[in-house]
Image: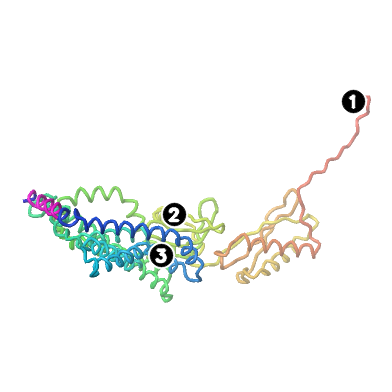
Amino acid sequence: MDYLSLQSFQNDLVKWFQAEVWTVPSFVQLVIIFASFFIAAVVYRHFKPKTKAGISSLPISFRLKAILQNLRKLFFPMFAAVLISLATIVMTSDMVATDVTINLIVLKLLFAWIIIRLALQFIRSSFVRNIFAMFIWSVAALSILGLLGHTISALDAFGMNIGAFRLSALLMVKATFALAILLYGAIFISTLLERTIANAHDLTPSSRVLLSKVTRVTLITIALLIGVTTAGIDLSLLAVFSGAVGLGVGFGLQKVVSNLFSGMMLLMDKSIKPGDVIELEGGTYGWVHFMGARYTEIITRDNKSFLVPNEEFITNRVINWSHGSTLIRVDVSFGVHYDSDPHLVKKIAEETAVLPDRVVESPAPLCHLIEFGDSSINFKLCFWIEDADKGITNVRGEVMMALWDAFKQNGIEIPYPHREIYIREMPSPNKIF
């Protein structure tokens, strides 16, 4: 039965070619079609730089510019369709009255391509948009040529029976296309919902991220199940392979799954959430900018992005400056000359530390004498801030500049290391030689 289907498809194709293509009117139409495409290509190439630059200079959004640039590429098939349409009108006039079947077929193919490309402009990814456009247009082309039924039969002929279930090339194509559409739809809808959830200011940042993750995972899972069942695959048939496949996937994706559930756990216990200030290894710190399914993005003050797997926040020690309270203590160490009054230095330092705007008045700054050094009396000044996400070095620098000004006004010197050499006795020249 399969052999007869393939043989019938081949015979019908040969008969169609002999009856419709291998004729003088068909040759004339092919010449017109090739000429139309050539003229359209020359005109498109001539106007391409001007139209591209004109669209780029328009005062519109980037997304709208991208759509216009995509539509600009349709000028070539549209102009070719116009030329073929004009030629077809002439060929069907009373003066000529010749066959225009091939022209009409090419026009239908061109219009199908134009309509499909226009309809898929909502897809942002050019790769995904091109894949969908080619697949849909291929099905439309087979339908226009009258070969869709034969193609379906030919694809169904390639397959094998697994019990009462038949696995064929047609089933694989249907399943792939259904899964692609449903998965993209699920991702598209989840992206829209995530934007809506991100604008819900009544929810906490961790709740918004957690709800977005759960929504995306749920929609993708539903899309997979619907896609498999829509393609005609009985899920109960997969029970035979579920053990081996599940074991292989488990070993291969254990880190991915671990990071996914670690991220959800972090959001549920609120130990880390977007906006928190996290200290990394080596004393580097940054704030949590994004919490994804696999990693958490931490941006430092020098605008470097650290992508830390979520699992590390569960298994390793984490220093979260913003957990529980945003109040952070900052220390500044300095030294003064031994001629200075330490009581006065302590008073001036504590009064000066509150001058910068970011330093809070409560708890009040404290200054302690910590060491009698080689060249100076050393102190440590402690003060508090509530906005560590705005930086530590800058506020520490402001406090130190204020200390410098205050010490200059009060005649307090900040010493620097130096050594004095005393020569007690000069040896006589006779002793030297």
Residue type, numbered disc 3: Arg
Which element type, helix, strand or loop, lies under badge 1?
helix
Mark in the foreground, 1 or 3: 3
Above or below, 31 against 422 in this view is: below
| Residue 5 is covered by the magenta coloring | yes
Query: Magenta residues?
Result: 3-15
Front: mark 2 or 1:
2
Which residue is located at x 15 percent, y 56 percent?
19
Secondary structure category for the residue under label 3? helix
Could you tell me the amino acid type at mark 2? Answer: Val
The disc at residue 432 is 1
Question: As drawn, is 78 to the left or to the right of 383?
Answer: left
N-term-proximal mark, 1 vs 3? 3
Extreme residue toward the left, this view:
1
Res 72 label: 3
- The x, y position of residue 100, in whole percent, is 22, 63
